[in-house]
Image (cartoon, rainbow, N blue to C red):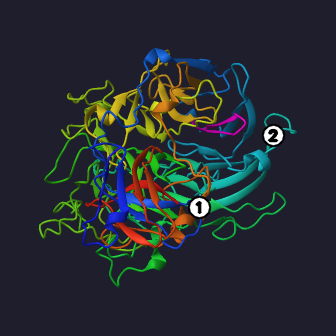
Amino acid sequence: MNYCKIWEPKNRIAPYIRQRNLIPKHFMEAFLMSFSAKQRIGAFVVAATLAALLPMSASAQTCTEPAASSFRVTTLVAPAGSASGTLYEAGNYGCVGMSIAPDGKIFIAKMQSGQIQVYNPGQTGTTTLAGTIPNYANTEDGLLGVAVAPNYSTSHWIYTFASDPCGLNCANRAMELARFTYDTTQAAGSRLTNKKIILRFPREKNDNHHAAGNMSFDGNGVLVIGTGDNRDPHNSNNNGYGPIYYPTPNADAQGTSANTNDLRGKVLRIKPIEFADNQTPTAGMDSTYSIPTGNLWEKINNPTFNPGWDNTDSISKVRKEIYTFGSRNPFHPRVDTRSGWIFWGEIGPDANTDALTTRGPSGHDEFNLATGPAFFGHPYCNGYNVAYGSLTSPSTTYGSLYDCKATGSASLTALINKSPNNTGIHHMPPPKAALAAYTSGTSTDDDPRFNATYSLTTISHASESAIGGQMYRYNTSSTSTIKFPPFYEGKVIFNDWARRSFRVITLNPDGTLPAGAAGVTNFAPAGFSTASYLDMQFGPDGALYALRNTSNGYSGGDGGLYRIEYTGTYDNTCYHPFDVTVLGPGATQSSTAIHRDEIKKMISPVVENGLLSLPAGYRNVELYNVSGRQIWNYHRENADEMFQVQLPANMAHAMLQAKILP
C-alpha cells in the first residue's frame, strides 16, 4: 500500500507521520474523535464522531448478498386458527412482543390476556404459560412488552410493561414497569414470582390512545422503553393532523410528547437497580432504577443543542429518564449494543390529505434512529420535518406553519411550547427528521422503497404501521450453523405490520440513509410467509426470530413463531471485526463501541480543528466503521513524543471506533 504525508512540511513532525488508506481513493470524508492523550496502555478504545464515508471501492471489504434460496424458515409455533393455540388471542390484540434469553428461551407477551408464554428450545409446536400480568386491556392498553434481564442466567429476572389494571376511569391510572422472577420450580402458569414495581407514570383518565410500549436492553444494563403520547388523534379540531388543540387537554400532545416534564411520547433510558428478591424498595429514581449518563437533561440547555433556551426554561422541568422526546407512538425501540444507536418505528398521524400551506402533511409513519438525545418534532412536525399549522388561540383557526427546519423565518411560528397543558420547558430544540417516512395519504415525499411492494421509483400508497427493526451483529466466534452471514453485519431488518413488508437497511456511518438500493433492499427469504409480524429479533444463535401477530392486519390475533435460518456457506474473509487485546477505561470486548458512556466520561474532547492527539510511544491509529470494518490506518515512525494527527475536513456526526497501538 502507498504511504503519503498528511501534514505540510512546516509542521515539525510531518516527516514522521504516514497515512495508510485501506480504501483507495474512496474513503472517509470526515470524522471527529475523542480520547485521552495521556493513556499509557497497550491499546484502548475511543468514542468517535464522524461525518460521512464516501462509497467504498471494490477493493474494500465487501460481502456478497446471499440469495433467497440460502435461507429456510422453521416453524416453531404454528398459528392454530382457534383459541386452542397458545399464541392465539381473540380480537385485534394478540402477541405484541418477545424477548430471547441467552439459553434460547423466548418470552412472548400477549396484549389482552396479559399472558407471558415461553417457548423452550426443542419444544415442538407450542409454548408454556409462565404467568399472567394483571392489566387493563382496551384498544391500545394492555400488556405491551417483555424484556429479559441482562443477568438473566443468574437472576432469572424478566421485566414487563403494562397498563395498570385499575381501569379506564381510574383516578390513578398509570403505566407500570415491573420485574418478575421466572421460577421453573413452580407449576406452569405460576412461574412469575416476586413482583417488584420499578417505574410508574400517569396515563390519562378516560383515554386509551397511544400507549406504544415494548423495550430492550443495551449492552450495559440500560433499559430503553417506548411510550405513546396518550392523546386522542380523532378529535375533530385536530382532524388527523398534529394534535395541538390545547383547549381540550387530551387532544393536545404539547402536554405530553413535547412536555419535558412528562414521560409520555418519549423514548426513555433507565438502568434498573439489581436489588434482591427479598427486598421491595419504593419504585422511583435512585431506589429501583438509576439514570445512565447521556440522557436529554444533560444536553437540553446546551446552546448548540437548543439555541432557544432562555431564563424562562429550567432544567428542573426536564425528567432525567428521557432520552428523546417528541414521539407519537414509538414501537419496539431496539438498541444496537455496539454503537448505542436506538431504532424504532413511529406510528404516524391519521390525516390522509396534504394541506401543506395550512394544516400540514398527511400522516407519515416513520422509521427513526437516535444516535443521541433529540427532539423528534411531534406534534409540530412530521416525517422529514414537514410542518403543521400553528394554533395560538383557543379557536379552530390555524395560523402560520411551525418552523420545523429552524430557519428563523419571521413568517413561521417558532417551536415554543406555550400550551397551558405543558409543565416542561418552553423552547424546543431543532427537531430531528425521520430516517425514512411514508404515508397512505396523498404526499409525494414518500420513500417508494417502503411500499408494500418494493420499488425504487414508483410510490404506491397503502395502510402503514412501521414497527422498526434490529441491527445485526455478526459473531465470528459463534459456532452456530444457522446464523446470518457477515453480509448483514451492521444492517437493520425492518418490517411494517400493515404492509406486511420486510426490508434490509444499510446506513451511512453518520446514521443517514443512502439513496436507492444502496440504502434499502427487499428482504424475502425462501419460505417466509407474508403476514403481520409485530416483532423480529436476532437470537444468540444469530438466526432471525419472527413473531406473527395476525395473518393480515386487523384480522384477529392468530399468533405464530418462526426462525429464519441461513443455510449457505460463510465467507469470513469479507469481514474483519473490530478487536482489541488490551482495553481502555470503561470498555469491554463485547461493547467496544462508539458511544459508551463510561468511556466518554474519561476521554478528553478532540483537539480543535480535527487534530487527533497520539501519545508518546504510540505509532499507529486504526479506524473502524460502525460495522466493525477497518477503513483507515495512521502510522508514524518516530514515537518519542506526543503529537497531533490532522484528520480529514468536514467533521460532523457519524461514528467510528479507533484503536491506538504502539
Q: Residues within 10 Å of mark 2 (few under 14, many from 20)?
A: some
Q: Is residue 486 left or right of residue 278?
A: left
Sequence order check: which comes first, mark 1 or mark 2? 1
Residue occupied by mark 1: 42
Q: Magenta span has 105?
A: yes
- Image marks 1 and 2: residues in contact by CB distance under 8 Å: no
- Circle 2 SS class: loop
Q: Residue 38's spot in the image, x, y percent?
A: 52, 73
The picture quadrant where one finds residue 244 is: bottom left
Q: Residue 608's spot in the image, x, y percent?
A: 33, 73
Of badges 1 and 2, nearer the viewer stands 1
Residue farthest along the bottom direction in this orientation: 311
Residue positioned 58% across, 26% down in the render: 559
Nearest to the observer: residue 504 or residue 242:
504
Residue positioned 46% across, 54% down in the render: 657
Residue positioned 45% across, 72% down in the render: 642
- Circle 1 SS class: loop
Q: Is residue 185 left or right of residue 262?
A: right
Q: Residues within 10 Å of mark 1 (few under 14, many from 20)?
A: some
Can residue 77 be seen by looking at this rendering?
Answer: no
Alpha carbon separation for disc pair 1 and 2:
52 Å
Position of the N terminus by quadrant: top left
Residue positioned 54% across, 67% down in the render: 293
Q: Is residue 99 above or below residue 128?
A: below
**Label 2 is placed on what type of residue?**
Ser
Q: Is residue 346 above or below residue 423?
A: above
Task: Give the residues drawn in magenta, as a range.
Answer: 96-110
Nearest to the observer: residue 101 or residue 132:
101
The numbered mark at residue 190 is 2
The picture quadrant where one finds residue 288 is: bottom right
Q: Magenta span has 566?
A: no
Can residue 46 be seen by looking at this rendering?
Answer: yes
